[in-house]
Image (tube, helix red, strand yellow):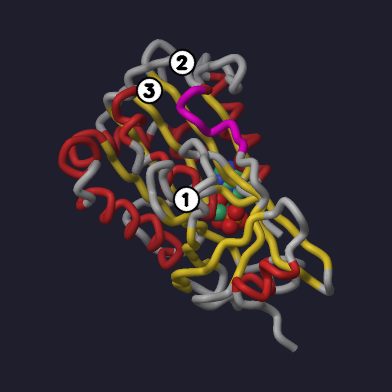
């Protein structure tokens, strides 16, 4: 049985009003994680950090899941970073995509992990676990992020060391990017990685590293302060709940698109 179809075949079968994007690159990082890139329709606009519904035709019906767009708003291609769930209705099939295959995409991106949802501050923390790094892969490649915040601290915590690789590669490419490397990222971006289930120089959940103060001492930064610090959080439901509570304890208030605040939250969607 063919699980995927070419962009042309899919365009013929796609529901009306849906975009079809063509896969241009696929990289498998571990048996749980992969990245893929697609063409970007010229009509498709989004703000860095937003997500969009993407999907496949399965048994003649479209099946969608929310995916953060990992590429920045200015990029010519779209990038996504996905988990592979063995029994996941979409990801068990999506993990088999190849260059030239088509993917369905709804037209309207949305989301709260956008610069507009935060009031200005000095330092922006981006707390992520697992595939929750995806919206930050977009935001660290957007000059607007560095124009709004003097310092950007991206934290990424995974179970295993190999799961950090997408983030490492993305940050390295960002540092070398002609548009944002020299002027912004090399001066303003810091990347802090920790691992919970294997040996690694930095160990532990981000929540424990915040609570113990180790995150701040490792980085040489002061504790969280609502006067200067802003935060964006993306990970599992449990990680969001616990990290959000630490922000509230530190005196930061949650924001939204229509009412900017000092931190914002978005779940890393899976399925
Ligand atoms: P742990 O290994 O201790 O469960 P997952 O792949 O399950 O989403 O986990 C990604 C990372 O998030 C893991 O390092 C995991 O740590 C961590 N994690 C899981 N739950 C929480 C939580 N409630 N708060 C902070 N980190 C969490």
Q: Is 162 situated above or below 44?
A: below
Residue behind mark 2: 119
Residue 112 or residue 76, whichever sits in front: 76
Q: Is 188 situated above or below 249?
A: below
In the visual, does 192 lie left or right of 106?
left
Q: Does the segment drawn in magenta span residue 134?
A: no
| Callouts 3 and 2 close, C-beta under 8 Å | no
* Discs 1/2, front: 1
Secondary structure of the residue carrying numbered label 2: loop
Task: In the rendered structure, find residue 70 and report the number of the disc placed on it.
Answer: 1
Task: In the rendered structure, find residue 181 and report the number of the disc placed on it.
Answer: none
Q: Position of residue 157 (x, y in %)?
A: 46, 50
Q: Upstream in the sequence, badge 3 or badge 2?
A: 2
**Magenta extent:** 110-116
* Discs 3/1, front: 1
Residue at mark 1: C-beta within 8 A of ligand 1 = no
Could you classify mark 1 by the number of other residues whose Cα lies within 10 Å: few (under 14), some (14-19), or many (20 or more)?
Answer: many
Point 52% across, 69% down: residue:
23
Secondary structure of the residue carrying numbered label 1: loop
Q: Upstream in the sequence, badge 3 or badge 1?
A: 1
> Label 1, label 2: how many angstroms apart (C-alpha)?
23 Å
Q: Position of residue 42 (x, y in %)?
A: 49, 49
Q: In the orientation shown, which residue stands out farthest toward the bottom?
A: 1
Could you classify mark 3 by the number of other residues whose Cα lies within 10 Å: few (under 14), some (14-19), or many (20 or more)?
Answer: some
Residue behind mark 3: 223
Q: Position of residue 212 (x, y in %)?
A: 44, 33
């Amino acid at each position: 049985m063919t699980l995927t179809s070419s962009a042309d075949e899919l365009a013929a079968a796609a529901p009306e009003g849906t975009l079809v994007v063509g896969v241009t690159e696929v990289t498998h990082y571990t048996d749980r994680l992969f990245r893929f890139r697609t063409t970007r329709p010229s009509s498709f606009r989004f703000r860095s950090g937003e997500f969009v519904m993407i999907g496949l035709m399965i048994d003649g019906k479209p099946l969608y899941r929310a995916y953060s767009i990992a590429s920045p708003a200015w990029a010519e291609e779209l990038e996504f970073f996905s988990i592979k769930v063995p029994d996941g209705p979409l990801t068990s099939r999506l993990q088999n995509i190849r260059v030239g295959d088509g993917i369905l995409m709804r037209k309207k991106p949305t989301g709260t992990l956008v610069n507009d949802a935060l009031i200005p501050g000095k330092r922006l923390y981006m707390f992520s676990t697992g595939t929750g790094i995806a919206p930050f892969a977009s935001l660290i490649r957007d000059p607007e992020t560095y124009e709004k915040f003097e310092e950007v601290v991206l934290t990424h915590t995974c179970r295993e060391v190999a799961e950090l690789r997408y983030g490492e590669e993305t940050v390295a490419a960002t540092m070398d990017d002609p548009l944002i490397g020299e002027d912004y990222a090399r001066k303003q971006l810091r990347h802090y990685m920790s691992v919970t289930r294997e040996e690694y120089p930095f160990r532990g959940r981000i929540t424990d590293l915040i609570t113990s103060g180790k995150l701040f001492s490792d980085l040489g930064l002061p504790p969280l302060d609502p006067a200067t610090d802003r935060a964006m959080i993306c990970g599992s439901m449990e990680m969001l709940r616990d990290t959000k509570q630490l922000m509230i304890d530190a005196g930061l208030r949650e924001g939204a698109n229509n009412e900017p605040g000092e931190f914002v939250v978005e779940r890393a969607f899976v399925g």
